[in-house]
Image (cartoon, rainbow, N blue to C red):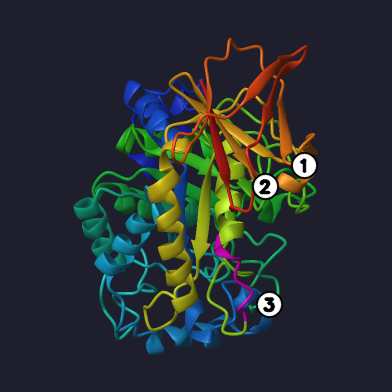
Amino acid sequence: MKKTLLAAAFGLSSLLGASAQAKYEPTEANLKSREEFRDMKLGIFLHWGIYSTFAQGEWYLQNAVPDRYEYAKAADAFYPHRFDARQWVRSFKEAGAKYICFTSRHHDGFSMWNTKQSKYNIVEATPFGRDVIKELAEACKEEGIRLHFYYSHLDWMRDDYPMGRTGTNVGKPRDKSDWKSYYSFMNNQLTELLTQYGPIGAIWFDGWWDHDEDSVPFDWHLQEQYELIHRLQPACLVGNNHHGAPMEGEDIQIFERDLPGEMTTGFAKSVAEVSRLPLETCETMNGMWGYKVTDNNYKSTADIIRLLIKTSGKGANLLMNIGPQPNGELPAVALQRLKELGEWTTAYGETIYGTDAGDVKPQPWGVTTKKDGKLFVHVLAPECLVPGDGGNPVLYLPLDWKVKSVTEFIGGAKVEYRKTSNGIAVMLPRKIEAVDYVLVVQ
């Protein structure tokens, strides 16, 4: 990108524009923010926009609507009169979440704040007329919850976005793309988000993959954009859901519907190398990201707990998604899951918050986490353990530690163990029926 464009987009000097491709050196504030993020373990993802009005998921424009302008009329009917930011945030906090990630602007191009860059936003285009991001930011500040913003790199509505492999059937012309205009629009919006709503924990980008099949590689000019973010808020983390290894300037590594290092969804072209950056797995509570009226396929509370534990066992955070309803309420089933999840995190939070992946790699029976000289052993599938002489299961841990004790996390009862040539064998005192049976090895 030319220096003059950099200066126009960022308001930076030409000398800074010339060094935009320099190696990224995170600030002390950024490194501190990374470590704090690494310790949080649980966040709530929120996919909410005018697509909720159709109750068919967040890709409804792409999947079913041949005319983007007909779709945009939904803004005039978007009136989420039951939206209560404080109630939302309290529910997330009580569930044990430490941060939320909110869709500030999804692929349909609709902005959920009072942006000055487009009238296609919740304040100017809807009868609701309220800046929900402002209200969420205030509620998060009151409750001590960090606020992250999802931001779409692609746009199915704007003419100036260079069309990729999606949005080809919504009536957008191909001959009106203007990358300079669109890039400036994005950076101006990011500047608003990072200067008007207080400290922001992270910017969570999505949409890079829209141009991953171009015959000529598409240059998103990410490094310059990342530099803008870090200049405006040095502690703000940058992540990008591009399904690959982290790029220069990124602070976290994201895995969509996958545990780090696994490849079960097919989003990635190959298994992405797990970096040393803070890690995050995002997953849906039911089947969709945005609200879909027919999707009642909610994960059980036990499944959500096990997923949280498995991500922690990989040293990662779980970003669990909820699609709010068009009236502004969270679905009743989601609220029930949050309540039950909160009961678990209240009892067992010590075994995940602030932990690293344990010394025993994930096993068929479960995972381990560690903190302060303690190894927390999470037995999630006792049927995978070896039965002992008395019929109760035996847990083999390949540890080279000098073990002082093995106890049950709940109650602190001592558990018998013996040394083996490969570590220790723990004789569990009974058959296990809990969602998560936790031992503490010191």
The quarter of the displayed image where residue 302 is located = bottom right
Amino acid under disc 3: Asn
Q: Secondary structure at mark 2?
A: loop
Which one is earlier in the sequence, the residue at label 2 or at label 3?
3
The quarter of the displayed image where residue 303 is located = bottom right
Q: Which residue is mark 2?
A: 431
Compared across the picture, whether 138 is left or right of 18 comes to left
Q: Is residue 358 above or below residue 212?
A: above
Q: Which residue is mark 3?
A: 63
Q: Which residue is mark 1?
A: 391
Q: Is residue 220 above or below residue 78?
A: above
Q: Position of residue 56 (x, y in %)?
A: 59, 81
Image: magenta residue range = 295-301
Which one is earlier in the sequence, the residue at label 1 or at label 3?
3
Q: Position of residue 386 (x, y in %)?
A: 80, 37
Give neighbour class at mark 3: few <14, some 14-19, many 20+ (Cα, 10 Å).
some
Compared across the picture, whether 43 is left or right of 27 comes to right
Q: Nearer the viewer, residue 52 or 381?
A: 381
Q: Which mark is residue 240?
A: none
Q: Is residue 24 above or below residue 33?
A: above
